[in-house]
Image (tube, helix red, strand yellow):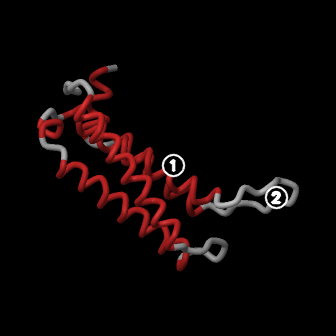
């Protein structure tokens, strides 16, 4: 099991799987449900949560494979943020121009980046005050 986790982490298979799931979830057509109560701004909460999870998994995978990233995390945090911002931007562009049933929204993209930013901040706090994550 440890060997399988090492391989999955080394090639970012878990975070890439999450990225694929996010892409699919954001492009699928949602059926209209008239009797279901609507929650205001639920899409913003969902975007925040998806990208928070993605960024945290991306960082954790890298920390599990290579202790170097634990010692100098800033480039890793930057990479996680840039990749999240890029993925969120692509999703919003695809929603706006490749689908007729979805609309791209810049506020969704902002919440994508906010989720990523909060994940990075929490990972940084854990790194400062938590135990060292040892590579697999």
In which quadrant of the rendered image does the N terminus lie?
top left
How packed is label 2: few (under 14 Cα within 10 Å), some, or many (20 or more)? few
Q: In front here: 135 or 107?
A: 107
Q: Secondary structure at mark 2?
A: loop
From the image, tell me which residue sits under label 2.
Answer: 33
Q: How many marks?
A: 2
Label 2 vs 1, first from the N-terminus = 2
Residue 4 image point, x, y percent: 31, 27
Let me know if residue 48 appears in the view. Answer: yes
- In the rendered image, the residue lying farthest to the bottom is 97
Task: Name which residue lies at 60% across and 74% down.
Answer: 103
68 over 95 or under it: above or below: above
Which mark is on residue 1?
none
Q: Toward the viewer: 78 or 13?
A: 78
Residue at image coords 17%, 36%? 70
Residue located beneath label 1 in the image: 49
């Amino acid at each position: 099991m440890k060997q399988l986790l090492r391989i999955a982490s080394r090639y970012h298979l878990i975070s890439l799987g999450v990225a694929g799931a996010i892409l699919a979830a954001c492009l699928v057509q949602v059926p209209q449900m008239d009797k279901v109560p609507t929650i205001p701004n639920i899409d913003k909460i969902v975007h925040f949560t998806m990208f928070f999870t993605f960024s945290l998994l991306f960082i954790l995978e890298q920390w599990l494979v290579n202790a170097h990233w634990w010692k100098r995390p800033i480039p890793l945090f930057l990479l996680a943020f840039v990749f999240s911002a890029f993925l969120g931007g692509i999703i919003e562009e695809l929603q706006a121009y490749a689908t007729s049933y979805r609309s791209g929204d810049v506020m969704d993209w902002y919440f994508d980046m906010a989720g990523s930013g909060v994940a990075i901040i929490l990972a940084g706090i854990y790194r400062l005050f938590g135990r060292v994550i040892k590579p697999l």
